[in-house]
Image (cartoon, grey):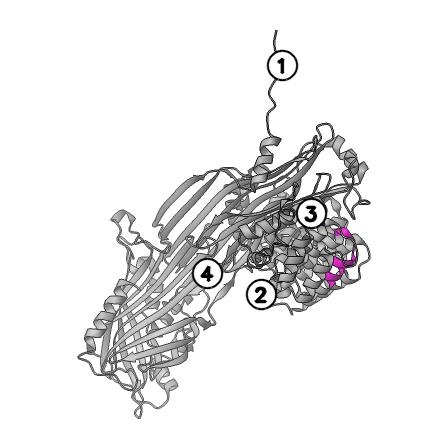
């Protein structure tokens, strides 16, 4: 609560001792002009601080009673006239920083607008409720909205009650508390309908939190409104980083000054005839404000703007924050552009920057941008494969996808598509869009229903293994509860690769969806009750059991199986159990209960050796958000990497987001070193590949090689360059809303977060040096910008708060099989990176005067190697041990 508000409450308490409690409704007396001072103020800041941006108008208000009901003096027609308008700063400023110095209201508003503002409005007032507002239809909308804000101050009940009222904020629930001569009015802004517009992210983690309060204090004397202080506060903060926040304070103050002789009361029976007698041009208007369109004078065209930033989006600059910031600005420009202008820059661009342009155009998510992309891309032609893929992934990451976008992708499946990989990507991305619609409560839209039927039917009836995998990956993105029976069937009965993908899909479901039937199937798979499974499949089944409220018997049976399993799988499960206990994962309490039994918890079982491991840790812990990482590594009995799984989760608002998952899987490589394959894996085809999940969206997996001949060919033609899994620009945070302020002005709130990312991975296999090395590199730059603007056309004010950073994270797994047991070293390395924060406050007038304040800080964050288990540290020392040089000179 502001200091001004506290002072007014104290004044109210002292005033109440000498005033009588009001009865009936508020009212004015005939043949008197009531003169008030009126202040309308808007303050914009980061959330705390004294040097706010904004402006205020100070004026006088004349209130005249034109008519009252002879039988009910609480029904009145009053006239409100604004006079003596002046503009001022909201913060103390020196003359050189005061944009209102040596200005007049006529110079700022324009003579025509000032004259319109001073034109009276009429209010049909009944027991404190504004029944009808009368104004002139030709008035500029911004002026009319300001009058609506003033008229809404006269909407008051002088008794304790709860009402649903229509005023400048829309149709809202309002609570009144009356005591002596004071009335406190609290408007429940979350209940308001009719004025709030915008969109936000489907994910709470990436979303924005808005806290709004609105209260007014009325002081009355003999049923006359003596003073009003109304304050509305909006605090908008990013869930991920709550210090990235901005605050809007809207203040209206009405104070009685004096009375003087006024016009005579009009004698008539009907309100309409009275209004007509005052001025026949008056028409009734709603208190709900109309839309105001701000025209950008002198703004560059899209083509001109693209020319100024295109260099920032060259491939070599993508790891820089400047590229991400340019991307965000380009998305904003594209959202205002026409299809023809978008097509013009698409068709004129070269190959190097065109993929980044496709990212931006698709991320704009307007009808013009979507139709431009569809006209530009030809899915019947395989030559622009990269552009097609970038378009599809940008659709998958869409912050607020439209039904039109989903219909377009569904329609493409019915046409000719040159690349089978693109067809697979379309199906997978459709699953991601389905999930986003369902998260918004739009699961029953016709296009969504059709998409659900398509992927469910495909996963249930497809016969080719590649098609089954494609539809299951789509179901993994959609997370439809009705898909669980289909996934269970494939997990238990299909081949190893299909079973693995089905289990990875089940792993992503919420605990509420993991029923006892699901856990029964997982137990059957793990314990191989019906057939023999690959150890990657069994390990995934064990993970699902551990992560979903396991029973005492389930945990006991898994631990008892350790020692009866292949050596590396025993070591993996042992490491998993130790990780659950150390990191206090949800199953830790049950595991502790089971381990109290010495038959289960003994040296023989807990002394298994091997290279496989599971480890979880914190990357960041904070009050607003935290991030965790996990590394699960499973090796074959021969010491060759079987599967590695790296996960990074972000936690905020009691929810989590899978920021990254990179899985590298290899099989059938034992013949290369004359080793014996593990149980159930003797006839596996030689294969290595990588799969990635990025911000909860499963991407199409990539294959390093398939078959011995393919491996040999790629070894001889290898360039040493890693294989790119995903590269591009992502609109990660996307929030826009329009806040209707009680003064009649509107505040535009925009939070955008962009990420330029390059995830790549590779697997080097050397028979000569008897060494294998897998590397996953995550490189990117992130920029988040929050902008709050109040544009009254005649004066504009705003606050922009932003953070940006550039980072590089490498996960490296090195295996030396020149000796036995093999030496395995895992490393998770974060390079040092810059972190920059900037706060900008600004005010400007159409006359050309402006004020800008910028404050910022830059920090160089130290690099680090994330800790893993002690055994790994000991092994890394051996792997990178430098042998002493025994040669001698003579």
**Taking the image as drawn, is residue 219 in sight?**
yes
From this view, report whether residue 695 is shown above or below residue 609. Answer: below
Q: What residue is at 55 percent from the left and 47 percent from the top?
A: 755
Q: Earlier in the sequence, mark 4 or mark 3?
A: 4
Q: Nearer the viewer, residue 461 or 299?
A: 461
Question: Which range is magenta?
Answer: 486-497
Question: Does residue 608 appear left or right of residue 464 in this picture?
Answer: left
Q: Which residue is mark 4?
A: 209
Q: Which residue is mark 2?
A: 440
Q: Earlier in the sequence, mark 3 or mark 2?
A: 2
Q: Please tell me how crowded label 3 is: few (under 14), some (14-19), or many (20+) other residues with Cα within 10 Å.
A: many
Q: Which residue is mark 1?
A: 887
Q: Which residue is mark 3?
A: 569
Q: Earlier in the sequence, mark 4 or mark 1?
A: 4
Rendered location of residue 674, percent (x, y): 79, 35
Q: What is the secondary structure assignment of the residue under circle 2?
A: loop
Q: Earlier in the sequence, mark 3 or mark 1?
A: 3
Q: Nearer the viewer, residue 739 or 131?
A: 739
- Which residue sits furthest bottom? 71
Rendered location of residue 823, percent (x, y): 65, 34
Question: Does residue 704 appear left or right of residue 122 in this picture?
Answer: right
Q: Nearer the viewer, mark 4 or mark 1?
A: 1
Task: Identify the image quadrant of the N terminus.
Answer: bottom left
Distance from the alpha carbon under mark 4 to that under mark 3: 44 Å
Q: What is the secondary structure assignment of the residue under circle 3?
A: helix
Question: Does residue 697 appear left or right of residue 141 in this picture?
Answer: right
């Amino acid at each position: 609560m502001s200091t001004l508000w506290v002072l007014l409450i104290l004044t109210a308490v002292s005033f109440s001792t000498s005033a009588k409690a009001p009865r009936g409704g508020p009212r004015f007396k005939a043949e008197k002009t009531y003169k008030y001072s009126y202040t309308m103020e808007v303050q914009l800041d980061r959330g705390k601080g004294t040097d706010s941006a904004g402006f205020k108008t100070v004026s006088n208000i004349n209130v005249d009673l034109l008519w009252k009901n002879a039988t009910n003096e609480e029904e009145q027609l009053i006239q409100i006239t604004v006079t003596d308008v002046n503009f001022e700063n909201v913060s103390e400023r020196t003359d050189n920083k005061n944009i209102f110095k040596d200005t007049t209201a006529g110079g700022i508003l324009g003579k025509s607008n000032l004259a319109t503002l001073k034109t009276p409005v009429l209010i049909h007032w009944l027991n404190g409720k504004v029944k009808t507002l009368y104004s002139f239809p030709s008035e500029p909308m911004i002026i009319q909205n300001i009058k609506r804000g003033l008229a809404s101050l006269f909407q008051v009940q002088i008794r304790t009650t709860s009402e649903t009222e229509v005023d400048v904020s829309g149709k809202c629930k309002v609570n009144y508390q009356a005591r002596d001569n004071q009335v406190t009015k609290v408007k429940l802004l979350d209940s308001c309908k009719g004025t709030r517009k915008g969109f936000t992210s489907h994910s709470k983690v990436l979303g924005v939190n808005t806290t709004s309060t609105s209260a007014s204090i009325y002081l009355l004397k003999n049923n006359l409104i003596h003073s009003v202080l109304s304050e509305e506060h909006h605090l908008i903060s990013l869930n991920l980083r709550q210090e990235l926040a901005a605050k809007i304070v809207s203040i209206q103050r009405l104070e009685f000054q004096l009375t003087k002789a006024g016009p005579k009361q009009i004698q008539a029976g009907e309100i309409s005839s009275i209004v007509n007698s005052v001025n026949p041009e008056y028409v009734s208007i709603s208190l709900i404000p109309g839309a105001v369109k701000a025209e950008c004078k002198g703004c560059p065209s899209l083509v001109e703007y693209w020319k100024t930033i295109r260099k920032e989006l060259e491939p070599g600059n993508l790891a820089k924050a400047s590229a991400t910031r340019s991307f965000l600005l380009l998305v904003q420009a594209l959202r205002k552009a026409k299809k023809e202008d978008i097509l013009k820059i698409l068709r004129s661009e070269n190959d190097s920057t065109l993929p980044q342009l496709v990212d931006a155009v698709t991320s704009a998510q307007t009808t013009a941008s979507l139709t431009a992309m569809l006209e530009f891309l030809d899915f019947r032609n395989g030559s622009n494969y990269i552009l097609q893929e970038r378009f599809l992934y940008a659709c998958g990451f869409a912050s607020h996808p439209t039904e039109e976008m989903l219909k377009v992708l569904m329609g493409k499946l019915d046409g000719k598509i040159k690349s089978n990989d693109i067809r697979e990507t379309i199906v997978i991305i459709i699953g991601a869009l389905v999930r986003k619609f369902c998260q918004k409560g739009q699961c029953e839209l016709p296009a969504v229903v059709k998409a659900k039927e398509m992927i469910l039917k495909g996963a249930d009836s497809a016969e080719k293994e590649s098609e089954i995998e494609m539809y299951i990956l789509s179901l993994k993105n959609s997370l439809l509860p009705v898909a669980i029976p289909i996934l269970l069937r494939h997990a238990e009965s299909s081949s190893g690769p299909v079973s693995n993908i089905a289990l990875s899909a089940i792993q992503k479901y919420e605990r509420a969806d993991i029923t006892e039937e699901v856990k029964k199937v997982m137990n059957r798979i793990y314990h191989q009750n019906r057939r023999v499974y690959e150890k990657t499949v069994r390990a995934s089944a064990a993970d699902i059991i551990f992560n979903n409220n396991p029973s005492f018997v389930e945990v006991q049976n898994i631990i008892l199986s350790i020692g009866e399993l292949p050596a590396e799988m025993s070591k993996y499960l042992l490491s998993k159990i130790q990780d659950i206990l150390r990191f206090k994962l949800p199953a830790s309490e049950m595991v502790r209960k089971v381990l109290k039994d010495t038959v289960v918890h003994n040296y023989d079982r807990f002394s298994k050796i091997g290279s496989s491991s599971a480890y979880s840790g914190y990357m960041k812990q904070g009050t607003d958000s935290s991030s965790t990482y996990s590394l699960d590594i499973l090796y074959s009995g021969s010491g060759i990497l079987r599967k590695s799984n790296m996960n990074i989760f972000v936690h905020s608002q009691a929810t989590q987001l899978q920021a990254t998952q990179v899985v590298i899987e290899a099989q059938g490589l034992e013949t290369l070193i004359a080793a014996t394959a593990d149980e159930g894996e003797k006839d596996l085809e030689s294969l290595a590949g990588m799969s990635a999940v990025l911000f909860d969206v499963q991407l199409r997996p990539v294959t390093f090689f398939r078959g011995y001949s393919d491996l040999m060919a790629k070894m001889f033609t290898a360039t040493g360059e890693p294989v790119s899994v995903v590269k591009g620009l992502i609109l990660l945070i996307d929030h826009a809303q329009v806040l209707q302020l009680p003064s009649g002005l509107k505040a535009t709130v925009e939070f955008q977060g962009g990420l330029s990312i390059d995830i790549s991975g590779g697997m080097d296999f050397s028979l000569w040096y008897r060494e294998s090395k897998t590397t996953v590199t995550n490189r990117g730059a992130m920029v988040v910008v929050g902008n709050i603007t109040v544009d009254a056309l005649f004066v504009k004010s705003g606050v922009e708060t932003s953070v940006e950073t550039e980072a590089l994270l490498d996960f490296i797994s090195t295996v030396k099989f020149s000796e036995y047991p093999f030496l395995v070293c895992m490393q998770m390395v974060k390079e040092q990176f810059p972190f920059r924060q900037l706060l900008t406050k600004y005010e400007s007038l159409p006359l050309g005067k402006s004020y800008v304040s910028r404050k910022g800080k830059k920090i160089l964050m130290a690099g680090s190697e994330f800790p893993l288990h002690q055994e790994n540290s000991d092994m890394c020392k051996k792997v990178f041990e430098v042998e002493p040089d025994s040669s001698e000179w003579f």
